[in-house]
Image: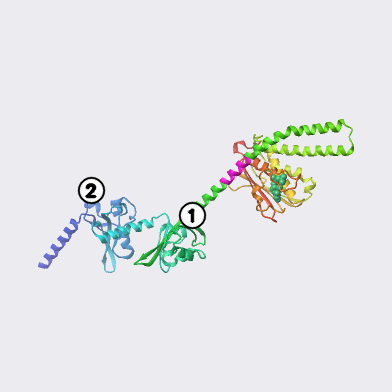
Amino acid sequence: MGRAMNKNIEKEYLLKAIGAFKRRFIVISPEFKILAANCRPDGITEAEIIGKCCHELFYDRSSPCQNCAVKETIKDGKPALMPKPEDTLDMDGMPCYYAYPIYSGDDIEAFVSMDFDIPTRGGLEEKLQRTNAFLRNLIFSAVDGVIASDKRGKILIFNEAATKVFGYTIDEALNTVNVRDIYPGKNAFEVMQNLRSEDYGGKGKLSSYQVDVVSKHGEIIPISLNAAIVYENGQEAATIGFFHDLRDQLLMKAELEKTQLQLLQSEKMASLGKLAAGVAHQLNNPLGGITLFTKLILEEYDLGDGAKEDLNRILKDANRCRDTVRELLEFTRQTRHLMRPSDVNRALTRTLFLLESQTLFQNIDIVKDLDASLPPVYGDIQQLNHLFMNIILNAAQAMVGKGKLTIKSRLLSDADRVCIEISDTGPGIPEDILPHIFEPFFTTKEEGKGTGLGLSLAYRIVENHGGHIRAESKPDQGTKFLIELPLAAKDLEGD
Ligand SMILES: Nc1ncnc2c1ncn2[C@@H]1O[C@H](COP(=O)(O)OP(=O)(O)O)[C@@H](O)[C@H]1O
Ligand SMILES: [Mg+2]
């Protein structure tokens, strides 16, 4: 009797104790249904709370919360303490969820879940724990890959961002990867050595050190690495590295350099063009004079054969000058001619037709691979003819009348441009010459054979059409010119 009485008092005290606990204290089933609770938040009655899912009732969520301590307890059957993420910056107290299982025999029957603040004011231990949790959070949410390893290279920390760089899951990295494996070749050795030298941000440190790493799938990735050796009682205990993926940055830099180079090139072309135009105009009149007066002398004077021959020579040279001047003027002409939807295949075929009959082309094998369904480009057909003429002539000249000329046209995969490829089996263009071929007056041909204006004109024409031209060549492997031209807008189609 007395024992039963005591039991009741004990129970009452237990209930009182739970009631006196000012924060949420609930017992829930493994399905997260509330079986008992000490809290009546906002006047909710018992009928409304019992049997409800805790995450639905308290957080309006359809599934358990991310930081749910009960979830942790379900995993391993052990009590769990989880910080509440929303309050993590409060340094005086760490709001937590705490959960522990209630066993019935070997099975878990229910869970206790309670909320409370771990008071950290003054409590060194808790403060440390609090800081640890904060740091852990910091590392795991860092933008850069963070990897820490012990002296033998076993990985201790591998954060979310590191999984993105290296392709390993966190589990894989912690259990199967040695930190040396993330570097190709001798890089691991070099990193370790430089880490211990004075030269890269001080002994035991590496600062913005550029190094290649290798991903799980063998991809080489350029990295800017900040790393440090962690010492404990003067002994090396671990190393920690922050891996910043440089791929995007390097790509952007290359892109920028390319644009700069293109800008420089077109600037150079423009100023040379103006100069050339000036020179051409200045030459035109005196050239006309030379031709006219030479002809007059030839007609009006009774000259000996020698003198006639000399004068004819003057005429011939003057004509050559006139041709150069004409090309120059063509080159510098800024006005757009007749821009309209034009058929690239037709321009190519026409140009070939004109050239084929010339002796230079007699032993040249011409291969045409033209995409018959090519949409029109927006362009001036005469300029396009001129463009192709210059490139095809160069090819034939390079092959010295013998070889294979291949002409291809196709739609580029992104479908707003046409690509024309003109390749030859000539001697190719040496590497040091290749950057200059589009410059006005640049020629490797002997005097009288080349003006050096053909390709600069080609460049100007392509530029006028909003396109790109480039040459690919290696000595002894022939040359390929690639021309990209934008398509005519849909509403302009059909000329
Ligand atoms: N298909 C080619 N194969 C080899 N070299 C070429 C080819 N096309 C152009 N070149 C080089 O580019 C230079 C410039 O060409 P271009 O501007 O047409 O002037 P030109 O033909 O009057 O020399 C040529 O002198 C030659 O060295
Ligand atoms: Mg030429």
Q: Position of residue 143 (x, y in %)?
A: 42, 54
Q: Which quarter of the image is occupied by the N terminus?
A: bottom left
Whether ligand 1 has any atom under 8 Å from the Cβ at mark 2 is answered as no
Left or right, 393 with reference to 494: right
Q: Quadrant of residue 274?
A: top right
At label 2, the amino acid type is Asp
- Spatial distance from mark 1 to mark 2, Cα to Cα? 53 Å
> What is the crowding at mark 2: few (fewer than 14 residues within 10 Å), some, or many (at least 20)?
few
In what element is the residue under mark 2?
helix
Q: Nearer the viewer, mark 1 or mark 2?
A: 1
What residue did someone put label 1 on?
A: 246
Q: Quadrant of residue 494?
A: top right
Q: Position of residue 94 (x, y in %)?
A: 27, 56
Q: Is residue 347 visible?
A: yes
Q: Position of residue 337 (x, y in %)?
A: 66, 34
> What is the crowding at mark 1: few (fewer than 14 residues within 10 Å), some, or many (at least 20)?
some
User: Magenta region: which residues?
Assistant: 260-270
First reached walking from the N terminus: tag 1 or tag 2 = 2
> Residue 109 magenta-drawn?
no
What residue did someone put label 2 on?
A: 42
Left or right, 313 with reference to 385: right
Q: Are marks 1 and 2 in contact (CB under 8 Å)?
A: no
At label 1, the amino acid type is Leu
| Nearest the eye: 385 or 184 | 184
Q: Is residue 377 visible?
A: no
